[in-house]
Image: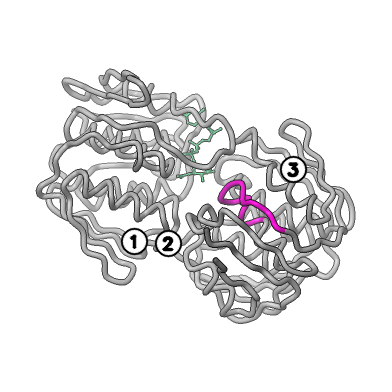
């Protein structure tokens, strides 16, 4: 299995271009099935999750053409087929086929979705939403079977503003009769991205990006076109990296407002950065200060940026506290940072980081996607060499990570 070899101690300068967002793209590809003949999506990242979603499209008899970062998906011969476990378990986002196939065929058979092991991650809110629209949901062995005679628009209140449930219900509701209102909807940029795609196909959606989304269902959607938003988590990860070892490192092609919460916390730590249109220029923070962070739904501090940010806090002069409110097991990577010399301690959903610690290269096993990003950052600031195993998890979320980092001066390579 390939591993990542990282030699710490470089200074990074130059430009890192931000890719299309994984969490948008993995919803947009399944959403393309709502279009009767074809759709086009620009700026799709070349990551493993997309490869598997395209394999699912093949199972559903769709064809696609890839040119650079553009994908054209042809759904003319779309056929409903069960989505097998070996594909659905590869990622969490396979659950978006529930919403789209329900809208198109009123029948879905899909094995359980996979995804990083960062907590219980139930999908009860998705299921409740489908049921409210008139579907019945059965679990047989490890497979969801969802059927409806017809879907009827209704009012759905989400007990938690879940990103996945909001998108999945929006997808299903686009094929329902009449109006669906989602109350307490998630407001993440990914939802706006998917809504804009559905609108381009002819669906009437208002309120995406607010906590009340109104969808007018129709069976007449076609010719979807959209561009994947820049990846806000990739951008946040590289801005944090710049604050550790950057020298005028430019992170380019992001929407800076999408990472406002992270930027505000970087300011608290004392990081100097400059915003320019769609880029951020950042240099190493010489005397980082401790801070406290609580992860929240958007526009709050993203849980996905918590793990990379922890690496910066290991260098701060004092004690920082992170309170994780979205997932219960997201501190495995912090414990691995301890093996590199960090001093962190978790108690339930609270992580205490005693900073100003020197980190040393280590051989470690990547526990989850963003945890892997944290270990990568730690390796880049550590004394000596770090070897990361199980790196396919990192490659799931960071397009061309080795190429992008090498270009700005990092010593990082994939070894067999
Ligand atoms: C998405 C992102 C993930 C990110 C998360 C929060 C994708 C593919 N993944 O995950 O990277 O960390 O948003 O920003 O887009 N929950 C329930 N029941 C449900 C649904 C969710 O209890 O039916 C809980 C989850 O267990 C979790 C919380 O709600 O504790 C957040 O989940 P959600 O916003 O749905 O995140 P995901 O869509 O899984």
Mark 2 vs 3, N-terminal side = 2
Residue 333 is marked as none
Label 2 crowd (10 A; few <14 / some 14-19 / many >=20): many
**Is the residue 339 above or below the residue 286 in the image?**
above
Which residue sits at x=65%, y=76%? 411
Q: Are marks 1 and 2 in contact (CB under 8 Å)?
A: yes
Nearest to the observer: residue 190 or residue 306: 306
Mark 1 vs 2, N-terminal side = 2
Q: Look at mark 2 in the image and give the residue it sits on.
A: 20
Mark 1 lies on a secondary structure that is: strand
Q: Look at mark 3 in the image and give the residue it sits on.
A: 322
Nearest to the observer: residue 5 or residue 179: 5
CA–CA distance between discs 1 and 2?
A: 8 Å
Which residue sits at x=15%, y=50%? 75
Measured as percent of width and height from the top left, residue 221 is found at: 16, 45
Mark 2 lies on a secondary structure that is: loop
What residue span does the magenta drawing correspond to?
Answer: 363-374
Q: Using residue 81 as the reference point, say whether residue 280 is left or right of it.
A: right
**Is the residue 193 above or below the residue 137 in the image?**
below
CA–CA distance between discs 3 and 1?
A: 34 Å
Measured as percent of width and height from the top left, residue 26 is found at: 38, 50
């Amino acid at each position: 299995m390939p591993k990542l070899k990282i030699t710490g101690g470089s200074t990074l300068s130059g430009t890192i271009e931000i890719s299309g967002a994984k969490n948008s793209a993995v919803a947009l590809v399944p959403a393309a099935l709502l279009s009767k003949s074809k759709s086009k999506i620009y700026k799709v990242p070349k990551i493993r999750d997309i490869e598997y979603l395209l394999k699912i499209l093949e199972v559903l008899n769709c064809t696609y053409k890839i040119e650079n970062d553009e994908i054209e998906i042809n759904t003319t011969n779309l056929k409903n087929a069960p989505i097998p476990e070996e594909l659905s378990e590869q990622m969490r986002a396979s659950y978006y086929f529930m919403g789209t196939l329900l809208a198109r065929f009123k029948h879905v058979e899909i094995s359980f979705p996979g995804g990083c092991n960062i907590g219980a991650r139930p999908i009860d809110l998705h299921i409740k939403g489908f049921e409210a629209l008139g579907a019945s949901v059965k679990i047989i062995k490890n497979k969801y079977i969802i059927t409806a005679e017809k879907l009827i628009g209704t009012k759905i209140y989400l007990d938690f503003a879940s990103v996945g449930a909001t998108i999945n219900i929006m997808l299903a509701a686009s094929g329902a009769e009449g109006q669906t209102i989602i109350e307490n909807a998630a407001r993440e940029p990914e939802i706006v991205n998917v809504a804009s795609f559905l609108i381009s196909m002819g669906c009437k959606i208002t309120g995406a990006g607010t906590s009340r989304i109104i969808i007018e269902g129709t069976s007449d959607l076609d010719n979807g076109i959209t561009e994947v938003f820049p990846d806000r988590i990739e951008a946040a990860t590289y801005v944090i990296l710049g604050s550790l070892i950057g020298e005028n490192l430019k992170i380019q092609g992001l929407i800076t407002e999408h990472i406002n919460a992270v930027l505000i916390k970087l300011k608290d730590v004392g990081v100097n950065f400059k915003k320019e249109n769609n880029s951020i220029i950042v240099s190493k923070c010489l005397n980082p200060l401790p801070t406290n962070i609580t992860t929240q739904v958007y526009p709050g501090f993203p849980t996905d940026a918590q793990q990379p940010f922890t690496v910066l806090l290991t260098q701060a002069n004092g004690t920082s506290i992170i309170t994780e409110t979205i997932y219960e097991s997201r501190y495995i990577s912090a414990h691995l940072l301890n093996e590199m010399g960090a001093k962190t301690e978790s108690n339930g959903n609270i992580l205490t980081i005693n900073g100003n610690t020197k980190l040393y290269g280590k051989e470690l096993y990547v526990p989850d996607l963003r945890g892997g990003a944290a270990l990568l950052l730690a390796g880049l600031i550590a004394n000596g060499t770090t070897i990361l195993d199980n790196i396919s998890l990192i490659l799931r979320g960071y397009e061309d990570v080795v190429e992008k980092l090498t270009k700005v001066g990092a010593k990082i390579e994939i070894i067999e």
